[in-house]
Structures are given as C-alpha cells and as structure tokens.
Image: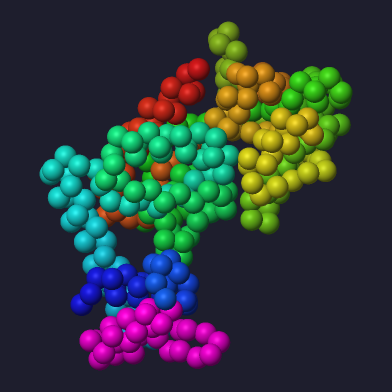
Amino acid sequence: MNLADLDLFVRTADCGSITRAADQLNMSSAAASAAIKRLERQLAAQLFIRSTRQLRITAEGERFLVYCRKALQEMEAGKASINALEGKVAGEMRISMPSDLGRNMLLAWMDEIMDQHPDLSLNILLGDALSDFYMDRVDLAIRYGNLEDSSMVAFRLARIERLLCASPGYIANFGMPEKPEDLVQHNCLLFQLSSRINHIWQLVPEYSGDGSNRQTQKPVSVRVSGDRYANDGDVVRRWAIAGKGIAFKSRLDIAADLRAGRLVRLLPQYQSPKIDLNLISPTRAQISPAVLLLRDMLRDKFSAQLDL
C-alpha cells in the first residue's frame, strides 16, 4: 500500500472531508478521491459512506484507522531513529503556539533552530484556541496549564506568573491602583478563551523574604470589567501599550515591553499563581530527536528570559 494513500485516508477521517484533506496535501479533490477508491479496492472494503452532503467513515474504516495511525507513527519514528544515528535533526514539525508568545518571541527562536538544522522543516500555527492534534494535524503544542488528557506527554518549559501592567500614558490619565480592590475602578482589558471571559483576576502577595509564613499570604480575587476583550493575547497587549486600560499578562509576553518602558508593572507586590508552560506531544511515539532538541533549546531560552 502507498503511504501517501494511508496519510490521505487518516486526514480524510479527521477532517470528515476529502476536499479539506486534499487541500492539506496540496492535491486536487479528484486525485484524492481516486486515491481513496484505490485504497478501498486494495482492502476490498468500503472505508467511507459518501453522500452529496456528508462523508461518514464506515465501521471497517474505523477499525483500519487505528492501525493506519500506528503505521504512520512508526514510520516517522523509524525515520527519526535513522536521523539520530547520523547525528541529524530532520523532518517536519507542525507546532501550535500562543499568539502573543509565538509572534513576539518564539518565531525568532524557531528561525535560530532552523538556521542550525537546515534539514528541519517547521509549520507554525499561531492562535490562543486549543488545537485538536488530529483535526489540525498538529505534532506539538506550546500551551499554558495542566494536561486534561493523561495519554499526552508534556515537557515543562518554564513556570510563569502573570503581572498587572499598563502604559505610562494610561497611568498619567487615570492613576495607579494602590491595592487589588482599586482595579474595579479601572478599565481592564480582558482575554477570552473559547466562550469564557477571564474577568476574575486572582492575585497572590509576593513573598517578602522577611521570614514570615508564606502560607498566610492568601490570594485575592477581584472581579474586573472593561470595554475591550479579545480572544487573542497579542491584541490585549497592544491595547495596553496604546493606553486603553490595564492588562493581566504573562511575564514572558510583556518582558520586552517592561524593559523598554512601553508598559509599567502595577501592584508589584502581587502576581498570579504560577502556571506551567508546556511543550505537548499527543503520544510518546512522536517524541523524536527534533522534539527533544526543541525542548532543550526552549528551556534554555525561557530560563534566560526569566532571569533578566
């Protein structure tokens, strides 16, 4: 059987559409349809039920899909093993990453790794919505937070806290909050993930280092509001720089802005509870030398940024 046909079959099953699967592989719908029919003839089984409105996988197709995925994963692992023996980092990685962090920090680092390893190909998906590894054909994802699926593998890249910030212009016009409760009097710039708006900001007093019991430092939750919210973290950062309100952003997202004076940290005695930033693989079988190289490079880069 042709591996390209197997790849097309898996993509078609994930997309629910031959046309969308063909688009992913830069081939015509007619050629993709012919390839699926060729595979069905070889198997002497119908893989999809076709109608004018939808494409539905058959019971036979569902069973074959399980083995197809494993076969393709094993082939990729085999190629990675050969490259590792030759001391090469090669192949293609399709990586999903957050909009703000990806656009303003990670893209430059991806250029560095590709310059050092010309046989490596990267396909970048920017966006804050959580990717579906199978539907979006994602090999790796860089995301904040804990895994909900225990079958996935997560490598911690860094532990990050969020900080309150605003532009010097906003502070000059509206003043600086002196305590968390003052935030309700300010225009706060809100981030929306899926249909949920993050309008409850949890703040934790930073440890003073004076020997007091840190467990007595209770978090403070403040319900904030504002006239702007977006499902893209970079948009929230840009609004803050433009003086439109107060943002609650990852330290990594605003590190360069704080150093350049575009943003000023507010209530510096408070921060958010720290959260893990992870490099996530859907299966252990997909952890190649290229993935491990990327993991180690990102850990070093993030450590250097957070030490500044």
Residue 285: quadrant of the picture: bottom left
Q: How is the image coloured?
A: rainbow
Left or right of 127 on screen, residue 9:
left
Q: Was residue 47 drawn as part of the magenta stretch in this picture?
A: yes
Left or right of 189 on screen, residue 212:
left
Left or right of 180 on screen, residue 34:
left
> 262 or 302, which is in the foreground?
262
Q: Which residues are magenta?
A: 29-56
Q: Is residue 246 above or below residue 191?
A: above
Residue 174 seen:
yes
Q: Please give the name of the residue rendered at 57% of the width and 48% of the height, measured from the top-left corner.
A: 128
Residue 194: quadrant of the picture: bottom right
Q: Position of residue 152 (x, y in %)?
A: 38, 53
Q: Is residue 250 above or below residue 23?
A: above
As drawn, the residue found furthest toward the left would be 85
Q: Please give the name of the residue rendered at 41% of the width and 43% of the height, measured from the top-left corner.
A: 279
Q: Position of residue 69 (x, y in %)?
A: 30, 68
Quadrant containing the N terminus is bottom left
Q: Please give the name of the residue rendered at 24% of the width and 86% of the height, measured from the top-left corner.
A: 43
Left or right of 156 on screen, residue 174:
right
Q: Position of residue 37 (x, y in %)?
A: 33, 87
